[in-house]
Image (cartoon, rainbow, N blue to C red):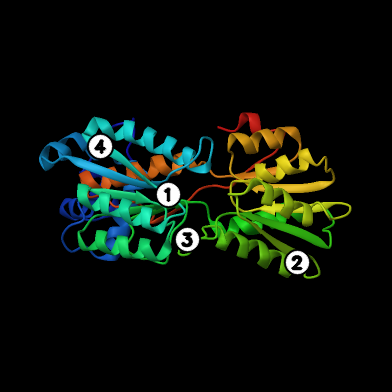
Amino acid sequence: MIKGGNKVTINDVAKAAGVSKGTVDRVLHNRGEVSRKSKEKVLKVIEELGFKPNLYASLLASQKDHVIACLIPEYAPGEFWSLAEKGITEGAGLVARYGIRVQVIKYDQYSVESFRNACCKVLEINPSGVILPPMFADETARFVSELSEKDIPYVYVDSKIDDDRYLAYFGMPMYESGRLCAYMLSGGRSVPEHVYAVRIARDKEGLSDPTAARRKGFSDFMSENYPDTKVTNVFIDPKDPESIMARLDSTIGSGQGERFVVMFNSRIHIVADYLEERNIDGCRVIGFDCLEKNLEALKKGHVDALIAQHTDMQAVNAVNVLADYIILGTPPVRKDNYTQMDILNIYNCDYYL
């Protein structure tokens, strides 16, 4: 171990890993032949010792302008992707000192054509790296294939598709978060005969459903532990507010006694607004993500709990990982980086940072 707060050097890493300095250099810059065992050993020691290569020296040696392209959906104020862009902006500030520029390119999240056009814009600027959520699975697969052909590294945020070429992923463990939601719904209480799983989203051709694994986790838990409970999936298009109210009236509003309601994306505040407007009590409601509207609903008592995930930090980490890889050639220690699942309620939400 390095004592006394001395700066860790490449020689220290080589000694602790039991390899040569040249091997450490090849791992750091992702070049040359290194056995998988040696690579894993070096990366583990780098993490344990907190080794930080000299970014300035590497940047000066590269003599190249670098751009990280962030491909994210357009959003209304206060929606989920505002949290991601907040993190992207913070990450951009951290890497700007190294001459790395971060460029955000947005698209209509309900238009595959808009997504294709945004992908073309990304390719035109020839970035050094790309950050994206796979909103359209098939189009994303084609796009990342082009990135791979051009040796452009890319990082998934929020969700990912079946793909083994990405540099890293930052997001919540989707399946496990669904099981956690079911456990919270039932833990310490009797489960009613009926649970409403509300999904307020656009049903557009080619549009991915990042919450599919979360819904499966929820369904599996309920089937394993409460096989007699009926789970009704309530799908609503958010484009028409009147249809939202009518659909909720015919489902949640028509129920009797205690009703259990869950939603697997960030729009639980819509259900909370409905419950408040219709003056419906006796519902146990659980949702995801700490949007301001969701937090307001939590404080009013219309939502019992939120499962939060620090979306902004996922984006910050994605920018940092790409910067390290672009400048130093240093791959991330872990390919899949899962955000902790934080449970918020009326008593602790004001202290969540």
Q: CA distance from mark 4 to mark 1?
A: 23 Å
Which one is in front in this view, the residue at disc 3 or the one at disc 2? Answer: 3
Residue 242: image x %, image y %?
68, 47
Q: Is residue 15 visible?
A: no
Q: Is residue 307 left or right of residue 32?
A: right
Numbered-mark total: 4
Crowd around label 4: few <14 · some 14–19 · many ≥20 (10 Å): some
Are the residues flagged by discs 3 and 4 in contact, CB closer than 8 Å? no
Q: CA distance from mark 3 to mark 2?
A: 32 Å
- Which callout, 1 or 2, points at the residue further toward the start of the chain? 1
Residue at the spot x=42%, y=49% of the render? 108
Label 3 belongs to which residue? 207
- Which callout, 4 or 1, points at the residue further toward the start of the chain? 4
In this rendered view, identify the residue nearer to me: 58 or 117.
117
Quarter of the image for residue 52 reads top left
Give the amino acid at mark 4.
Arg
